[in-house]
Image: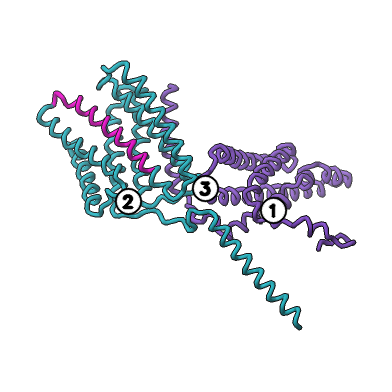
Chain colours: A purple, B cyan
Amino acid sequence: MMQLVIFLALAVGLLVLLLMAMRRQPSHAAGSAGELVTAKKTLESLQLGLLPAELVDQIFGERDLTYVGTIGSNEIRSLFLSERKRLALTWIRRVREQVRALKDFHVSRSRMFTQMSRWRELSLAFDFAGLEGRCRVLQLLLLWRGPYAAPGFARRTAATAGRVCSTLDQSLAFLTPSIPVSLASESDADGSMV
Amino acid sequence: MGTSLLWIAGVALESVILLRFLKRRLYAHYPFFFAYLVVVWSGEIALWLIYRYHFASYSRFFWADQFLALLAGFGVLFEIVRKSFQRYPGARTFATSVLAVMFAILCGYFVFQLLPSSVIVHEGFSDLERDFRAIQALTLGGVLVVISYYRIEVGRNLFGIIAGLGLYVGSTVLSHGLKSYVGPAFNAAWSVIQPYTYLISLLIWVFTLWSYAPAADPKIPPDIDDGYGAFARQTQHTLGTLKAAVSRADRP
């Protein structure tokens, strides 16, 4: 029986992979100037706009709910919960979109490198897959049990996304203009940089 | 009668593909696939003659032919990896690793299963074929994962080769699995599934290999620095525009 299950899984898996390969759109570009800039912007929007711990705590922490609770109106409370659920779902959807965009950008570049590191690439592939999986699970939890279903899970998802971002940030570092120390130290009295 | 018709249809479709390969010189682009088809086609013709004039030795020759076709199938896998990742050195590193690991498993299997008991020849060959096909399925699956992950365009020809081979290998593994579980009762279904799936694979090959259709070149040549060069040029252009604007502001 076990043997049958293995062979069935193998055959069905191969046929599913064939179907997936048929459906997938190939990517032609590989690190064009426009793509590099878009990727850098995506990375910044993730790191600065979506992933900061304060923002995640604000959306998934119960501080606001406690405050709304002090008003003592059930109507306001349920309105707040539905709005917060919508906000949390929007957050997770945007994180997923941005992560997918980064993954597409990353693979379109890394497939061209002769000196590509197999292990680093494999670990990134697992990170991307894990992150997408986490995002899906979180999305389902939010839909099923509301915005405060899994605050710890949301924080860990954001932390994983942050880790992936910092790895990718290294490969896009050359797009960040460095400010020479001599210039940086020459600031006005009011703190504005020269 | 039905079996003969399927046989004739199979040989006819193989002949069409081989003729197209010769006419459009596709053998220069896909030599391993061409060799595979020649092995399969000549094997079928030889088997037909043996079946008609020397039936007693048919079984032995049948399994020998299957074994040759199986080995030629691994050549096709090598070709798929070689051609798919030609312009993608990074992805090729990955796919080659998959192929190397699978080849090592195959060699190990060959050494441990075949050499100590050389009497296997035809009686145990059904199991041997199932295991070899399973290794082929795993290899092809691994290559497909790499192609999908790196979103590589393989072109119509190569996609046809992959789809036809994948369908045939997948259905063979499935049939063998069911056969070993259900037993002789599955033989009737087996005699239908196998030839029809093979015919579908042949039809896929006829349509996708009618003429040479390679993958389109990636837009950016496989030198990633070119991307940075274009980006730097864009920055220079923006800087030039800014300088011009500042110059205008300087001279009211």
Q: Is residue A14 visible?
A: yes
Camera-nearest label, 1 or 2: 1
Q: Residue furthest left?
A: B53
Compute the Cα span from label 1 to label 3.
24 Å
Locate residue B104 relative to residue A148 in the image: left or right: left
Circle 2 Cα neighbour tier, 10 Å, few/some/many (<14 / 14–19 / ≥20):
many
* Quarter-of-image position of residue B53: top left
Residue flagged by tag 2: what amino acid is it? Thr
Residue B238 or residue A89, whichever sits in front? B238
Q: Closer to the observer: label 2 or label 3?
A: 3
From where the camera sits, is residue A143 visible? no
Q: Which residues are magenta?
A: B55-80
Amino acid found under the numbered disc labelled 3: Phe
- Crowdedness of circle 3 by 10 Å Cα count: few (<14), some, many (20+)? some
Residue A140, placed above or below residue A109: above
Q: Which mark is residue A44?
A: 1
Q: Residue at x 27, y 37 (%)?
A: B195
Q: Chain of mark 3?
A: A
Q: Position of residue A147 (x, y in %)?
A: 73, 43
Same subunit, tags 2 and 3: no
Q: Is residue B124 above or below residue B95?
A: above
Q: Chain under label 2? A: B
Separation of marks 2 and 3 at Cα, in angstroms:
30 Å
Quadrant of residue A120 in the image? Answer: top right
The residue shown at (74%, 57%) is A179
Mark number, residue A113: 3
Reply above or below: A4 against B224.
above
Q: In percent of the image, x 79 and y 57: which residue is there?
A: A182
Q: Check disc 2 and report the residue beneath it.
A: B208
